[in-house]
Image (cartoon, rainbow, N blue to C red):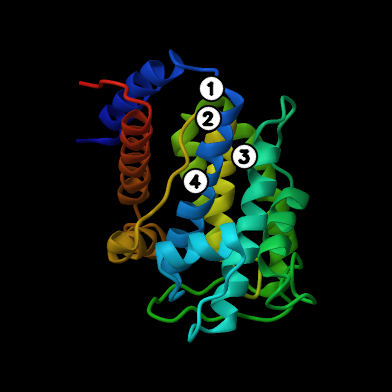
Amino acid sequence: MGVNDLLKRIDGMRAEIEKIRPLTKEEALQLKSFYRVGLTYTSNALEGNSLTLTETKVLLEDGITVSGKPITDCYEAEGHAEAFDYMFEAAGGDDFQVTEETICNLHRLFFKRLDDKAAGKYREYQVVITGTEYVPPAAGDVPGMMARFIKSLETLKITEHPVILAAYAHRRLVDIHPFEDGNGRTARLLMNLILVNKGYQIVSIPPVLRADYISALMIAQRDKDPSVDPFNELIANCEIEAQKEFCRLFHINIK
């Protein structure tokens, strides 16, 4: 199924979901907690964090660390959950607009327990990404590229479907790689910030799709015959799965 067909399916399911909104206060709070744990687990797991879904839930909801697990894994979970809260609140604003400050805040909240000095600040040295031929831009080019990136988001939000815009935001932030570390998790939070603001479901990329996810990014980044289609299709399919999960939780019958 091509991207356009996937988007039509997404919007059809979104229309069905809209029929039960607004949720009650209790439903909304429980749903937020559900996504807070789920996204924190999957986004960290993609980067090699060893906490399981259950361990992530116990840490975030009960404050109990897991014996034998690296303390940095716990810091990543706590930081991601705090960044998620910021993302969720920012997405609800009527005058919502992605800014450099927004992105830096997402990174700062996630990364401050790991390296407070680098949290929310653009890198000052060249980074090398293992397992790929892609070379991120020079550190001196990052501020200008980020400024242009923000302008492009404002332009594309007029012409692009929100799911494609969210996928672009994720992909482009990873391309620029503005921070020393934590770029992938910041990009996934940014993607979901856009999706939630536009009334779509939070996208989690499960660890089982890690190879497909990395491959799709590499295809978009390669010098010869790059294509964004695999990545857009991956994100669109993940949005559909998120919609199915929402429908399951709220007993919505879908075709």
The N terminus is located in which quarter?
top left
The disc, 2 or 3, on the residue closer to the chain's N-terminal end is 2
Alpha carbon separation for disc pair 2 and 3 = 32 Å
> How far apart are the two marked residues, 1 and 2, measured between alpha carbons?
6 Å
Where does the image place residue 78, in percent across and percent down from the top left?
62, 65
Q: Is residue 118 left or right of residue 39?
A: right
Mark 4 and mark 1 in contact? Answer it, CB < 8 Å. no
Left or right for 92, reference 11: right
The image shows residue 12, relative to residue 189, as above or below, that is above
Q: Give the number of the mark in front: 4 or 2.
A: 2
Image x and y of residue 34, in percent = 48, 45
Q: Residues within 10 Å of mark 4 (few under 14, many from 20)?
A: some
| Residue 33: quadrant of the picture | top right
**Disc ID at residue 35:** 4
Res 88 visible: yes
Which residue is identified by label 1? 23
Badge 2 is on which residue?
27
Nearer the viewer's eye, disc 2 or disc 3? 2
Asked if the residue under mark 2 is in contact with the one under mark 1, i.e. CB atoms within 8 Å, the reply is yes
The kind of secondary structure element at disc 1 is loop
Q: Amino acid at mark 2?
A: Glu
Task: Identify which residue is drawn at 71% across, 73% down.
Answer: 113
Label located before the other in sequence (4 or 3): 4
